[in-house]
Image (cartoon, grey):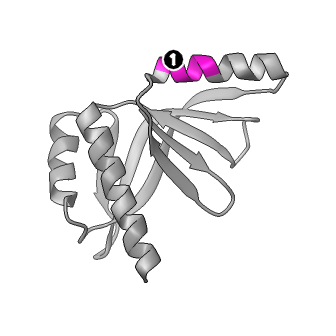
Amino acid sequence: MLKLTYTETSFYLECIAQSLEEWVQARVLLSLRVGQYLCVKPSRASFLLPVDLPGVERLKVLACRDDREFMVLDTCDTDYMEVTLQGSWLSDSFEDADGLFVTAMSDRTEFFLHKLWLEAQACASCL
């Protein structure tokens, strides 16, 4: 599964070996045990990837072939493409902008998308 952690200023993408159902169940149990409110709702999350990143064309093939109901790729401009994922949003309230987004796709697509995101972060930090 993929987990996107959103904060006020950024987000972090993780690839987790645990199944989506097991992870959400554990998160709900944790919230119950500590008495914390938890909102879980179907949602979408988007982020940008540079179009000149090696592997973007392969991601397009994977998205069309294996995971088109979970991931949509759109061109934003000459430099970036938008990756939109279908999944679930978890936060402390319905209106909260800080929270977690989780989704599950084929393992191959998850690992490859995570690899591309890490490469994009490395390129951005070099600038």
Taking 11 as reference, is 114 left or right?
Answer: left
Q: Is residue 84 magenta?
A: no
Dominant secondary structure of the residues highlighted in magenta in the image: helix
Q: Using the image, determine if residue 114 lies above or below residue 90.
A: below
Residue 39 found in image quarter: top right
Mark 1 lies on a secondary structure that is helix
Residue 65 located left or right of residue 94 = left
Residue at figure coordinates x 73%, y 42% from the top left: 95
Please tell me which residue lies in front, 105 or 125.
125
The percent position of residue 8, horizontal first and vertical second, equals 69, 59
Most extreme residue toward the right, as rendered? 35
Q: Amino acid at mark 1?
A: Glu
Question: Which residue is at a point 44% across and 34% down the rendered structure image?
Answer: 16
Q: Which residue is depicted at the point 38% across and 58% down?
A: 118
Q: Nearer the viewer, residue 18 or 87?
A: 18
Relative to 77, residue 58 above or below: above
Q: Is residue 11 left or right of residue 33?
A: left
**Residue 50 can be seen in this image:** yes
Residue 92 location (% of width, % of height): 76, 35
Residue 91 percent location from the top left of the image: 69, 36
Q: Quadrant of residue 76?
A: bottom left
Left or right: 82 with respect to 14?
left
In terms of depth relative to the viewer, which is nearer, 39 or 5? 5
What residue is shown at x 14% (from left), y 47% (from top)?
61
Task: Specify the quadrant that holds the C terminus.
Answer: bottom left
Q: Which residues are magenta?
A: 21-26
Residue in front for this viewpoint, 67 or 109: 109
Q: Circle 1 sits on which residue?
A: 22
Q: Quadrant of the N terminus?
A: top left
Query: In this picture, is 19 found above or below 12?
Result: above
Disc 1: CA contacts within 10 A as few (<14), some (14-19) or many (>=20): few
Visible in this render: residue 82? Answer: no
